Amino acid sequence: MEKSPVPLAGRRALEYLESVADRPVRALATSAELRQMLDRPLTGAGEPADLVINRLADAGLRGTIASQGPRYFGFVVGGSLPVATAADWLVSAWDQNCGIHALSPIVSVVEDVAASWLRELAGLPASWSVGFVTGCQMANFTAIAAARQKLLADAGWDVNAQGLFGAPPIHVFVSDESHYTIFAALRMLGLGAERLTRIPTDEQGRMRAQPLAAGLRAATGPALVCAQAGNVNSGAFDPIAEIADATRERGAWLHVDGAFGLWAAASEPRRHFVAGVDRADSVATDAHKWLNVPYDCGVAFCAHPEAHRRAMSLSAAYIVESAAERDPRDFVPEESRRARAVPVYAAIATLGRDGLADLVERTCRLASRMAERLSRHPSLRVLNDVVLNQVLVRVQQEESEQALASERAKGPGTKSTDQDLTREMIARLQQDGTCWAGGTTWHGVAALRISISNWSTTESDIDRSADAIVAATDAAVARSKA
Ligand SMILES: Cc1ncc(COP(=O)(O)O)c(C=O)c1O
């Protein structure tokens, strides 16, 4: 028998992990170069395993973005705590299909324990059900499927049996700043991504509770409200307690998308941002963001376990259902699936309550440090209140509210110098590779968005990265004046 390539893969993976903090934070090869490394004619006999693993590991050194490293600030991407990576290796070694208890008793128990820790950390009641899905997109989907199930059942309609044809319409409320995955979930569930009421937001991107309450009072029939804990750009939180009051009064379903913001609950000084989340009907979050477990892992929480289960599970003659134990598939859309709760268990067990609070606080403090350093520069302007781990910054040469207001009025397509300079600064920064952060449009103007979500980021990473952003800004401004 050919010798196992697993030890080699372990060594190559360690080599990667040990170098990731020092690598440029960008791909070192083009797609054409990667294709040249990887694209081979499919053979009849197959290739030696070591050769294949070495080829993949070599390509990985050149073709990955070092998003696992401490100076990756793009999107909202956490790294992976060493213990979470280690637990994930166990998951691969076990290769459990954890759909049902009968297939993997350990995973069923690990899910149960991790679910109860997660509820405790998020301040959610012990009665809530929990499903481990691929990410917050699927957590939003799962939660809204449970909402659809219960809202229609309460209106006398069995959506599992009858589908949506002829069903009582569900009135859906979102905000102007809801994450696009909410719209994807609504679309996939037949609720329509446009058949909804958009509630306006304030300057930080928070849903305004008053127009929501008025809208809820005016609408008749089943209603679903999608609120948000943690705006993907600004990090701001919708006023969840006020939204919960309005939703409860109306007997509507409140779903909270807390992809990263829910983790504020783990930290005493920021817990107030999610006050009221325990009065929601469902909550979605990601573990692969701020908890720093490897991709992929999202979590769907539901205050109505029966609706959650009815929305997700189906039985078949050969499926062994457990009466007393957790069948993980009851709470997720998939049947066969990876044991993604195992790294969650390892991360939480190792961090403990204090370690997680420290992770959240530390990254928030680093975001403030970044904002403070950047705002010292005469041509940079921080656009958001840095309340969490997100910083929005743009090039703005003339430090005046008027300049910003007039650009906002013109909209994102505006050909202003500052818009162009901001985009140029972002391109230069990404090319430089000291750190990586992406662009966005915030209230009509181009901005660099910086998300600090990695357990390994230090003050010196922030200072180095701030220097790189300043250098990219200076280079762009100098070029425009040349
Ligand atoms: C608020 C919010 N919701 C949902 C998502 C989607 O999460 P995922 O990409 O893990 O599915 C994100 C991702 O950044 C997010 O910030």
Image: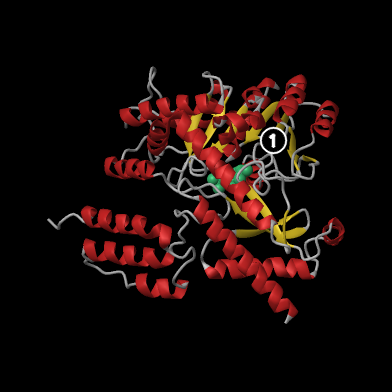
- Percent position (x, y) of residue 367? 60, 48
> Ligand 1, what quadrant?
top right
Nearer the observer, 240 or 378 = 378
- Percent position (x, y) of residue 157? 67, 25
Please state if 399 lies on the left or on the right of 426 as rendered. Answer: right
- Percent position (x, y) of residue 88? 35, 43
- Can you say which quadrant of the picture contains the N terminus? bottom left
- Can you say which quadrant of the picture contains the C terminus? bottom right
Residue placed under numbered mark 1 in the picture:
227
- Percent position (x, y) of residue 81? 41, 44
The answer to whether residue 79 shows anywhere in this view is yes
Nearer the observer, 367 or 53 = 367
Where, by quadrant of the figure, is residue 23 drawn?
bottom left
- Label 1 CA crowd tier, 10 Å (few <14, some 14–19, many 20+): many
Q: Is residue 70 above or below residue 433?
A: above
Q: Is residue 399 above or below residue 199?
A: below
Nearer the observer, 196 or 360 = 360
- Residue at the spot x=38%, y=75% of the render? 36
Tell whether circle 1 marks a residue whose Cβ is less than 8 angstroms from ligand 1. Answer: no
Please state the total of marks drawn on the protein image.
1
- Residue at the spot x=54%, y=31% of the render? 266
Q: Secondary structure at mark 1?
A: strand
Q: Is residue 391 above or below residue 45?
A: above
Please state if 137 lies on the left or on the right of 47 as rendered. Answer: right
- Residue extending farthest to the left is 1
- Residue extending farthest to the front is 376
- Residue extending farthest to the bottom is 482
Badge 1 amino acid: Ala
The answer to whether residue 159 shows anywhere in this view is no
